[in-house]
Each structure stands twice: as C-alpha cells, then as structure tokens.
Image (cartoon, grey):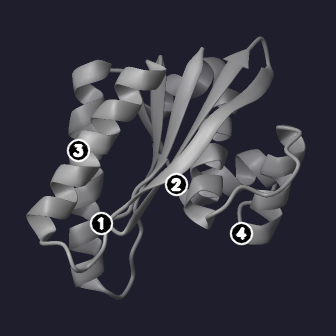
C-alpha cells in the first residue's frame, strides 16, 4: 500500500510517501511545496493545488493521511493554513476517498511512544524506522513522513481516523 502523508501549510506544505507492506515500511520520497508571501494568496493556493495534483498523479497513493490543525493564538495563520489544507484535501478527494487525519499528539504517540515527545525525537525515530542516513529536511517533510508512518501503524483501526 502506498501512503501519502501531508503536513499542511501555506508557506511550506510537507509531504512524504511510504510503502507499507505487512508491517514493514519503506520510504519512497519526500519533499515540500513552497510558496512565498510575495505571491498573491490565490496564486499560493493555486500552486499548492497544482503541485498536489502532480504528487497524487505521480505516486498514486492508496491512502492519504493529513495532520489536523491546532492553533491557539494567531487566527490569521489558522485561516490561511486552513485554506491550504482545504485545497490539499479537495485535490486528494478527487483521487481517493481514503483520507485520514491525525492530531500531532497521535503522531508523536505512534512514532515515539510518547504523545508529548519533542520534534527532534520524532525526527530521530523516523530516521531510525526507515533506515535513513540523515533526518529528513525541512521539518515539514519529516513531519509528513511521520504522519504516513502513523497511518501505517493504525492497521485495521484506521477507520476511526477517516475524515468525516
């Protein structure tokens, strides 16, 4: 099964693709979709849409997992990142209805075994689990890989994480 993990963002949207087969995971590729504040907001969303379409066409994921958004302070950031996440979900929904979402705490729990783990601990575990030579950069890409690994680890209980 091919799993695409997405760490939503407007400036930096991380993505990671893994193959999961009988409890074993293999990293296929990872990266980021980048936009800049110099671009108009609609252009940034269009770039995310276009690049996500290219990713889905290229990797043909069986299932796609997103990180849920949690913001406490900055409403403007929450709205713009939410728009980027929405565009990404819409593109992915055209490809498959197998869309899932996980909270940051669930990702940390699945990858490290501790829901309040530090970002560096998650990155180190991703590196170890996938036998990578170095930690994935930037952080958004490493987070996306962790999201894909989290989804792979849910097994039959994944139904409870399906987007509603």
Foreground: 65 or 40? 40
Counting residues from the N terminus, which is met first, the one under dot 1 or under dot 4? 1
Q: Is residue 10 above or below residue 17?
A: below
For disc 2, the marked residue is 103
Gap between marks 2 and 1 measured at Cα = 15 Å
Instruction: Mark 2 or mark 3: name the one nearer the start of the chain.
Output: 3
Count all numbered tags in the image, as a single digit: 4
Separation of disc 1 and disc 3 at Cα? 13 Å
For image coordinates 22% across by 82% down, the residue present is: 76
Mark 2 or 1, nearer chain start = 1
How far apart are the two marked residues, 1 and 4, measured between alpha carbons? 20 Å
Local crowd size for mark 3, using a 10 Å CA cut-off: few (<14), some (14–19), many (≥20): many
Q: N-terminal of the two: label 1 or label 3?
A: 3
Estimate the spatial distance between the alpha carbons at disc 4 and disc 2, rounded to whole Å: 14 Å
Q: According to the image, label 4 marks what residue?
A: 119
Taking depth in this image into account, of 49 and 21 the one nearest to the observer is 49
Q: Position of residue 92 (x, y in %)?
A: 30, 31
Mark 2 or 3: in front is: 3
For disc 1, the marked residue is 81
């Amino acid at each position: 099964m091919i799993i695409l993990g997405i760490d939503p963002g407007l400036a930096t949207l991380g993505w990671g693709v893994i193959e999961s087969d009988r409890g074993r995971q293999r990293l296929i590729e990872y990266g980021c979709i980048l936009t800049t504040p110099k671009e108009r907001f609609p252009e940034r969303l269009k770039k995310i849409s276009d690049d996500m379409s290219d990713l889905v066409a290229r990797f043909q994921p069986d299932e796609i997992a997103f990180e849920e958004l949690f913001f406490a302070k900055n409403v403007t950031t929450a709205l713009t990142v939410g728009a980027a996440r929405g565009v990404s979900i819409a593109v992915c929904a055209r490809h498959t209805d197998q869309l899932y979402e996980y909270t940051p705490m669930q990702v940390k729990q699945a990858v490290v075994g501790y829901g309040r783990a530090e970002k560096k601990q998650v990155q180190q575990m991703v590196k170890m689990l996938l036998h990578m030579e170095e930690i994935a950069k930037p952080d958004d890409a490493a987070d996306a890989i962790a999201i894909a690994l989290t989804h792979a680890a849910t097994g039959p209980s994944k139904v409870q994480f399906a987007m509603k």
